[in-house]
Amino acid sequence: MSTWRNWSGTETATGVEVLRPASTDEVAAVVKAAAEQNKLLKAVGSGHSFTGCSVPEQVMIRLDGLASITTADRASGRVTLGAGTGLAKLNAGLASFDLAMANLGDIDKQTISGAISTGTHGTGAKLGGLATQVVGLELVTADGSVLHCSAEENPDVFAAARVSVGALGVITSVTLQCVPAFLLRAQEMPLPLGEVLDGFNELADGNDHFEFYWFPHTDLALTKRNNRVAAGVGPAPVGRLRGWIDDELLSNRVFELTNRLAVRRPALVPRINQLASRALSAREYVDASYKVFCSERNVVFRESEYAVPREHVVEVVQQLRAWIDGSGERIPFPIEVRVAAADDIWLSTAYGRDTAYVAIHQYHRLAHDRYFDAFEQIAGAFGGRPHWGKLHTLGADQFRERYPRFDDFLAVRDRLDPRRTFSNPYTRQVFGP
């Protein structure tokens, strides 16, 4: 028996049985045995979700034994890997084959199965989330069956299982459509928030990958534009000292200290944010795509993120700013805005619409409920869909209104897991009993 805790400390599980199968056949055997004993079972990745989506109630499967690339075809770009493979390990492994994922989020701590199952995404107006790069997967269902799923084989399960919050079974392997390894030129610079919002569509459409961070209580935003380089351009990475100062000292160590100060002296937060935003300096560098996409984030926080129709994102940010200014709340963490193309995955937050993501954060030692509730109301007025792994209060009735294929997903769930072997309090909240 063991105690499990997620990264942010928002969820724990005590007294659970821990199993570590080393193959798909072993996963099938332990799942079938658990189901026959009416035990509830969840597969757990890195525990990076803030919600209870992966919290085990009785039996926890760790997929550490399925954590490597098994096949890689450089000609086609198809790569198959174990579902427990961490993104950091995957990125390094793909680089050894001169391959890369077309898009990534901004951290690499998750496992591939956890990342796709919760709808993890990066930014790019013409690109989808990580799950859109999946062309096949292997799913162990509650009766111990192993389903091979793709657009051609079990297509309805494939449409449901790529973003499934672990409610359909245990994914044991994933096949990705990768691209030849590429370099990105990163251009980071602070700009007035008003200028960023006025030119948002031009910035989003004019760059391969665009995002910005706005510091509440200030008029400044940090913009990030990442674009593929022209042929013949080589890497020019950030220098070791500059990288340590920017990405470790300022972004982690000093930021931790300023957040601790915010706990003791909340009235100083606007001044702290103003100083932090003014300290931002422009920088430009060229490096391997995954090194540009991913950053080290060590300060513990709480996060909520909503996907809204892209055409409404400026209104959402403006309304959120007005609420913060009038609320008296003190928010030391920046607000992050990204974009994604529409896709056809049933429970993807970008299903059927070009999407913008607004992510809000609060330091883990500061209260967040009032802030997050207000944000949820603002985003909800525009049909916002919460990230499956980040904090929200919605249930099945609201999701049915916001996802056109929600009932189709539930029908697949009824077929694959009629006795709810893979349920937990979170799945019962978002999908019903």
Image: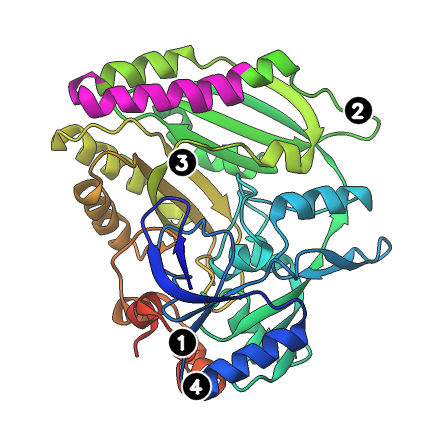
Question: Which label's residue is closer to the chain start, 1 or 2?
Answer: 1
Residue depicted at 47% across the width and 88% down the height: 36
Question: Which label's residue is closer to the chain start, 2 or 3?
Answer: 2
Q: Which residue is mark 1?
A: 40
Disc 4 residue type?
Gln
Provide residue 351's location: percent of width, then percent of height: 47, 62
The front one of 66 and 301 is: 66
Residue depicted at 61% across the width and 50% down the height: 86
Label pair 1/2, CB-CB below 8 angstroms: no
Label pair 1/3, CB-CB below 8 angstroms: no
Residue depicted at 65% across the width and 38% down the height: 290
The front one of 75 and 141 is: 141
* Label 4 secondary element: loop
Q: CA distance from mark 2 to mark 4?
A: 58 Å
Disc 2 residue type?
Gly
Q: Which dot marks residue 37?
A: 4
Q: Which dot marks residue 336?
A: 3
Q: Is residue 219 visible?
A: no
Q: With 11 as the anchor, is 26 left or right in this view?
A: right
Q: Which dot marks residue 391?
A: none
